Image (spheres, rainbow, N blue to C red):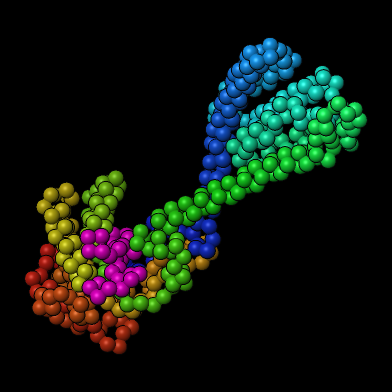
């Protein structure tokens, strides 16, 4: 097999950087998260309704008990409205809890329960003031009116700004309607000297201020919902982008790209050590294996390559069929890049020998490894439909041809003179030839280990 370092690799297909990786996936994830959140939020709101109903019940009983103890009087009329509110919140809460399960829930139910919450507040407020024959100015004095901010605050848990805005509109229209229906006055005029002046606090300007503050509180919750939605969308976008990059780019590169490394995005020239690994006679081995076993074989081979590469702090740029392109010194160059690449080659040969000793494969696995050092272009390349990290340049082609030369020389490992110069033990390598590779003016000196790992032959 003759690997092409620039060949398309379906395992490494990625979406273009600069757009949102997995944009359709992002939309699906946001929709799925919002669906799960909607059901969970409505269930939580249901329990909060129940808690509000219980708290109203307990509070009224306690307050009435204290009032009787201190004055001997009871406010039975107020209690009746409190019981209605308590019972209403309990019933609506129980209904929403029963419906807030994925199998039963429909988005329209959220609007229904919002209307029930707001309607409960408005109806009780109307009767609380109307039964006492008070003008609409007294509306803020009805305790149930102060449940309106609570309804808005609890509704914000839905993360649905449309429902929240509808709740604000219904509350606003309902309160205005009640005030008009009950003859809201411009000024609560107090003429009798013995009557206290505090009713003036319910004149129209003061009530308008209260009304405005209520709407502002609702608007604040609506802005909070919008911000939360944007944060969720941003978090999903970032997560999907990082997941896509981690899937389609090498693990050593993906975090740098995700963090916005401009050099890697637009590409850069640098010195790197390039290593090609290839299985000899993989076609013959495949003939004796069924597809499942062949898949297991390549998985086992790639797993061993990855373990050896990580041990020596390189990374696999891509797997190409039954081979691999491995880089050392990318994205950050080091003085020992070549030494680590050569050590990796020896280590991989030992790993393959140990694998052969287990007799897991129908025949011994034979590999060829070619190593070269040179200037490369590395970065993200591609068009709007396909983008991947790759290395390009003459050095990549030379490394590929050195790997092919292992067949002719009967060696498992061959390295160029440039790679051997970085060896920690130069004496462990011997020159075995000069290769006039096609397209090059100068031949390339080829070195093999002095202690040869010649378990292979030309395939």
Q: Position of residue 45 (x, y in %)?
A: 59, 30
As rendered, which of 130 and 365 lies closer to the eye? 130
- Against 390, residue 65 (above or below) is above
* Relative image position of residue 205 (x, y in whole percent): 83, 40
Q: Residue at 77% of width from left, 21% of height from top?
A: 128
Relative to 353, is 103 on the left or the right?
right
Q: Which residues are magenta?
A: 310-338
Q: Nearer the viewer, residue 14 or 366?
A: 14
Please tell me whether residue 143 is drawn above or below residue 168 in the rendered image. Answer: above
In the image, 166 versus 13, the foreground residue is 166
Q: Position of residue 442 (x, y in %)?
A: 27, 87
The mark total stands at 0
- Apparent side of residue 439 relative to residue 144 in the rendered image (left or right): left
Q: Quadrant of the C terminus?
A: bottom left
Asked if the stretch drawn in magenta spans residue 15, the answer is no
Residue drawn at point x = 37 percent, y = 71 percent: 391
In the rendered image, which quarter is residue 222 located in? top right
Q: Quadrant of residue 422?
A: bottom left
């Amino acid at each position: 097999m003759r690997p092409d370092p620039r060949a398309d690799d379906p395992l490494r297909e990625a979406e273009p950087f600069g757009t949102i990786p997995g944009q359709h996936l992002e939309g699906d994830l946001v929709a799925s998260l919002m669906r799960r959140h909607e059901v969970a939020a409505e269930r939580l709101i249901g329990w909060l309704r129940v808690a509000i109903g219980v708290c109203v019940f307990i509070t009224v009983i306690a307050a009435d008990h204290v009032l009787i103890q201190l004055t001997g009087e009871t406010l039975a009329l107020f209690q009746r409205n409190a019981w209605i509110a308590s019972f209403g919140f309990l019933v609506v809460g129980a209904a929403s809890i029963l419906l807030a399960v994925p199998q039963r829930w429909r988005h329209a139910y959220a609007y229904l329960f919002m209307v029930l919450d707001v309607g409960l507040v408005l109806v009780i407020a109307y009767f609380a003031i109307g039964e006492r024959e008070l003008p609409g100015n007294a509306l803020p004095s009805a305790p149930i009116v102060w449940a309106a901010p609570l309804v808005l605050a609890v509704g914000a848990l839905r993360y649905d700004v449309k429902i929240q805005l509808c709740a604000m509109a219904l509350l606003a229209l309902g309160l205005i309607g009640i005030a008009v229906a009950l003859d809201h006055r411009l000024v609560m005029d107090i003429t009798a000297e013995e009557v206290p002046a505090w009713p003036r606090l319910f004149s129209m300007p003061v009530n308008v201020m209260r009304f405005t503050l209520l709407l502002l509180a609702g608007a604040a919750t609506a802005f909070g919902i919008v911000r939360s939605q944007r944060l969720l969308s941003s978090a999903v976008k970032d997560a999907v982008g990082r997941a896509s990059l981690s899937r389609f780019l090498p693990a050593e590169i993906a975090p740098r790209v995700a963090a916005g490394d401009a050099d890697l995005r637009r590409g850069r020239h640098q010195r790197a050590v390039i290593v090609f690994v290839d299985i000899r006679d993989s076609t013959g081995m495949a003939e004796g294996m069924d597809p499942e076993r062949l898949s297991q074989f390549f998985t086992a081979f790639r797993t061993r390559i990855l373990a050896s590469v990580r041990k020596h702090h390189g990374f696999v740029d891509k797997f190409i069929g039954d081979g691999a392109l491995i880089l050392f010194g990318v994205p950050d160059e080091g003085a020992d890049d070549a030494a680590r690449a050569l050590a990796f080659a020896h280590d991989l040969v030992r790993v393959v020998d140990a694998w052969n000793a287990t007799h897991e494969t129908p025949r011994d696995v034979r590999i060829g490894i070619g190593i070269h050092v040179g200037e490369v272009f590395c970065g993200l390349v591609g068009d709007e439909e396909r983008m991947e990290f790759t290395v390009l340049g003459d050095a990549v082609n030379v490394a590929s041809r050195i790997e092919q030369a292992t067949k002719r020389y009967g060696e498992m490992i061959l390295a160029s003179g440039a790679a051997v110069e970085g060896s920690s033990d130069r004496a462990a390598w011997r020159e075995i030839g000069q290769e006039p590779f096609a397209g090059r003016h100068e031949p390339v000196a080829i070195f093999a280990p002095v202690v040869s790992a010649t378990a292979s032959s030309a395939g």
